[in-house]
Image (cartoon, helix red, strand yellow):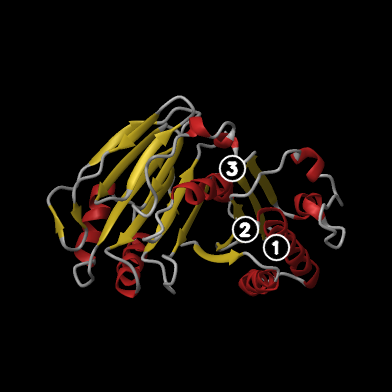
Amino acid sequence: MWKSYSHEVDDFSHVGEVRRAAVSLAEGLDLDEVRAGKLAIIVTELASNIVKHAGRGEIILTVTATSLEILALDKGPGIPNMLESLQDGYSTGGTAGNGLGAIKRMASEFGHYSRPGQGTIFHASFRKDGSDPALDLLGGLAVPLKGESVCGDTWAFVKTEEGLRIMVADGLGHGLPAYEASQQAATVFKEQGRISPQESLQLLHNSLRSTRGAAVSIADVDFGKQIVNFCGVGNVLGTLSDMASSKSLIAHNGTVGVQVRKIQSFPYPWNTDALLVIHSDGVTGHFNFKDYPGLSFKHPQLIAGVIYRDHQRVNDDSTVVVVRRPA
């Protein structure tokens, strides 16, 4: 399970707070002093840029077993000349001579998306040696409703012989009871053996009876056969989307752990350019890659960040997971 932490940034005092939070989260990665210093530079530059150029925004830190994924989100004026801004040492605000070029050089993975008048998103990944190859194929975040200390949504994945199996759970409501339901779903999901998506969801239904219940969807991805088997109950929605079209994946009504009338898996062909997107109802399903030229070619974590920034509902927990096929 990946865990995300959101930090609002609208003042220079927040820069140090986010930097300290990132370094603290990365302690579990056993970074040496040099690499910890690089991480601090990356987070400082990204947070400072938000304040200087956009006025306000958000830093999302996502911890995986082998990496720290950093997203810097804003809805500012955008960057008119990204190539110039990415030159090593270039900085319009006089920050220690680091600049975005230094981030590109020091990060394990670095990406960006910016459009005039619509804001900018940066993604920087700080990975351990021998990190999970799945980090190149998927990205995701689960952010709690503002004011809540825990997120009622969660997501998890397991690797299979054929590809990946992904689960997204949205505990009923929000706060601690929703968190407990979704965490129970994730724990049981991770412990399951090689069973069908229907069997998996049935086991989750039985195990969540002691909780308030959750909406849950499971996507079983076979990269070789180019098929996604999708099985869902409730309003965790899935799509296969590219620049030309978007296919909604079927989920049945109900609440896992409370009342489920039907559990059924549906197979969908997955063409080369499409992205699998699964999200809770804390994110609207109105996003369309036609509105974001070039975005579908970016890293899945950055794509998840764009969808979250522009389509989150402010009155609920928000989860987005994005998966691409291997090249």
Specify the quadrant of the image occupied by residue 250. Answer: top left
Whether tag 2 and tag 1 are in contact, CB under 8 A, the answer is yes
Indicate the position of residue 126 as horizontal and vertical percent values. 67, 58
Indicate the position of residue 60 as horizontal and vertical percent values. 57, 61
Indicate the position of residue 195 as horizontal and vertical percent values. 29, 51
Q: Under tag 3, what secondary structure?
A: loop
First in sequence: mark 3 vs mark 1: 1
Indicate the position of residue 253 as horizontal and vertical percent values. 18, 49
Q: Which residue is mark 2?
A: 70
Q: Which residue is mark 1?
A: 43
Q: Amino acid at mark 1?
A: Val
Neighbor class of circle 3 (other Cα within 10 Å; few <14, some 14-19, many 20+) is few
Which residue sits at x=31%, y=68%? 178
Which residue sits at x=44%, y=27%? 271
First in sequence: mark 2 vs mark 3: 2
Judge by depth and name the residue closer to the eye, 282 or 240: 282
From the viewer's perspective, is 106 left or right of 68? Answer: right
Q: Under tag 2, what secondary structure?
A: strand
